[in-house]
Image (cartoon, helix red, strand yellow):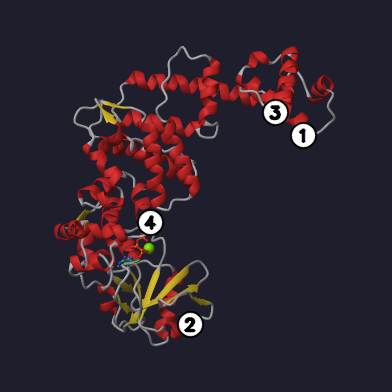
């Protein structure tokens, strides 16, 4: 087996072997290289101790007590880690202590899945030991597209419950299946996921969310009994019928909405916006199980907003992501009729927020597709969107300079000197005119400026 590895990485390995040590690329990067995918990062494992690694690489950084040395090369930062064995995970998170070993096989045995438990080293000149080390059949499983635990699956999931989520994550992202005995062990140990920190759960969930067809991973999490543990409010949607499409439950509808969002994600959105849109699609109907009554879900958007906030906080998502996602959920139930006046359209824009409205329409389109929308509902949505765009365009074109009065007029009318109060009044007038363009006459604005100056900001 010949793998292509970057020159930087080969150099690290050769330096270590010149120093009399074994060195291999190992783990996820071997898996990816065999699949013909560029690994995100290259990890090197060696029998050299951290002190010995540091002696060989002067530009290195000994990061932590877990025996990993980061070596900075020209292009890559390479993590060089001393072989170690699995040790007690008393808190089911991190090994309590690192036990080093000189056996590569032992190091591979502590890894989670067979495809992640392979090592490869370039054959040195003169040819002795080179090539792939694959004691657990990782290459065959990779070819068969199977996620299989290394060793006794029950033991492996008990050692570190994160593996319960890593298995479906790999399966979903790579389009693999989970080997039956491994899947059965996940079901038996699913309850252990309750002890995982929100940050670790989040890390795996985000990878599932960003998969090309993210529904696959969430369905798997549910089938394996993990969703019930990490997101019972989402699991409950599985037992709530969705109104429109017979035989579809709210969970399947949510997944269809998520897939639609993933498939239509606009080019050029930021990573954060992409995440917000996926989360909102997945969670937009989270309020339905609690509001289900006679085929209706009265005010489910508000219940859903609150439930989603709890869930996203539990997963330790950044505040801004939580806020933007729940805002979309809160507003996703707007309904529209062609009779809306322009000022109704403007009020709607202001309620949702100019910087959120595009996302809200995106969510609603995904929602419609996710419930097998018929054409007219989408057509209404598009009609409203065109009117929203028109209003946004008009508001952008309309600036304070276009108002029928300016600061001097206001000062003269009210006997004011230049100062912040003048600015406050102009801003308030501007808001009113944006809302109702017909107010933009000198007479009306001067009258309004008196009201504003006299009694704070009148309701607009
Ligand atoms: P990714 O593509 O997400 O980086 P990866 O397999 O490289 O996937 P990492 O978290 O970078 O995942 O871990 C690198 C390697 O360390 C894995 O391939 C695996 O061999 C081992 N590993 C990581 N996490 C665990 C774990 N929880 N239990 C056992 N082995 C693990
Ligand atoms: Mg990795």
The residue identified by callout 4 is 198
* Residue picked out by circle 1: 420
Q: Residue at x 26, y 59 (%)?
A: 164
Q: Residues within 10 Å of mark 1 (few under 14, many from 20)?
A: few
Q: Secondary structure at mark 4?
A: helix
Q: Quadrant of residue 178?
A: bottom left
Horizontal side, residue 214 vs residue 16: left or right: left
Q: Is residue 440 left or right of residue 291?
A: right
Q: Which label's residue is closer to the chain start, 1 or 4? A: 4
Q: Position of residue 388 (x, y in %)?
A: 52, 23
Q: Nearer the viewer, mark 2 or mark 4?
A: 4
Q: Position of residue 49 (x, y in %)?
A: 40, 84
Q: Eyeballing the image, is 381 above or below 41?
A: above
The single residue placed furthest to the bottom in the displayed view is 20
Secondary structure of residue under mark 2: helix
Residue 108, relative to residue 252: is it above or below? below
For marks 3 and 4 on the same chain, the one whose residue lies earlier in the sequence:
4
Mark 3 or mark 2, which is nearer to you? 3
For the N terminus, which image quadrant? bottom left
Q: Nearer the viewer, mark 1 or mark 3?
A: 1
Mark 1 and mark 4: span between their CA atoms?
46 Å
Residue 459 found in image quarter: top right
Per the model, the C-alpha gap separating discs 1 and 2 is 62 Å
Q: What mark, if any, has residue 427 been given in the picture?
A: 3
Q: Within 10 Å of the Cα at label 4, are there few (<14), some (14-19), or many (20+) other Cα atoms?
A: some
Residue beneath disc 2:
54
Estimate the spatial distance between the alpha carbons at disc 3 and disc 4, rounded to whole Å: 43 Å
Q: CA distance from mark 1 to mark 3?
A: 11 Å
Element marked by disc 3: helix
Cβ–Cβ below 8 Å for labels 3 and 4?
Answer: no
């Amino acid at each position: 087996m010949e793998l292509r590895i970057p020159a930087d990485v080969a150099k690290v390995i050769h330096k270590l072997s010149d120093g009399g040590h074994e060195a291999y690329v190992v783990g996820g990067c071997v898996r990816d290289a065999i699949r013909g995918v560029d690994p995100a990062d290259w990890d090197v494992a060696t029998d050299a101790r951290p002190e010995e690694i540091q002696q060989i690489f002067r530009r290195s950084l000994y990061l932590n007590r877990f025996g990993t040395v980061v070596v900075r090369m020209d292009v890559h930062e390479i993590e060089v880690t001393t072989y170690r064995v699995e040790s007690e995970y008393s808190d089911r998170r991190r090994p309590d202590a690192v036990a080093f070993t000189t056996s590569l096989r032992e190091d591979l045995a502590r890894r989670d899945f067979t495809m992640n438990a392979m090592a490869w080293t370039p054959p040195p000149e003169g040819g002795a030991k080179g090539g792939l080390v694959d004691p657990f059949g990782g290459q065959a499983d990779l070819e068969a597209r199977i996620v299989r635990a290394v060793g006794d699956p029950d033991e492996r999931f008990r050692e570190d419950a994160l593996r319960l989520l890593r298995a479906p994550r790999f399966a979903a992202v790579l389009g693999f299946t989970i080997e039956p005995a491994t899947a059965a062990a996940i079901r038996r140990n699913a309850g252990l996921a309750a002890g995982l920190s929100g940050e670790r759960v989040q890390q795996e969930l985000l990878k599932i969310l960003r998969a090309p067809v993210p529904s696959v991973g969430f369905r798997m999490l549910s089938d394996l009994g993990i969703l019930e543990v990490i997101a019972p409010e989402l699991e409950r949607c599985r037992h709530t019928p969705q109104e429109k499409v017979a035989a579809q439950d709210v969970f399947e509808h949510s997944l269809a909405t998520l897939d639609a969002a993933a498939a239509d994600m606009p080019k050029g959105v930021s990573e954060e916006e992409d995440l917000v849109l996926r989360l909102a699609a997945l969670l937009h109907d989270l309020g339905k199980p609690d509001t289900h009554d006679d085929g209706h879900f009265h005010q489910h958007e508000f219940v859903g907003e609150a439930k989603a906030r709890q869930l996203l906080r539990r997963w330790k998502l950044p505040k801004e992501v939580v806020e933007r996602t729940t805002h979309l959920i809160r507003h996703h139930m707007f309904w529209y009729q062609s009779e809306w006046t322009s000022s109704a359209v403007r009020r709607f824009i202001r309620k949702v927020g100019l910087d959120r409205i595009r996302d809200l329409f995106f969510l609603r389109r995904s929602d419609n597709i996710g419930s097998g929308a018929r054409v007219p509902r989408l057509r209404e949505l598009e009609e409203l969107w065109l009117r929203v765009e028109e209003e946004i365009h008009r508001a952008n074109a309309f600036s304070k300079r276009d108002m029928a009065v300016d600061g001097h007029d206001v000062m003269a009318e009210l006997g004011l000197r230049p100062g912040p109060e003048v600015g406050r009044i102009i801003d308030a007038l501007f808001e009113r005119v944006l809302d109702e363009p017909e107010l933009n006459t000198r007479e009306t604005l001067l009258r309004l400026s008196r009201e504003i100056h006299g009694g704070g900001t009148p309701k607009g």
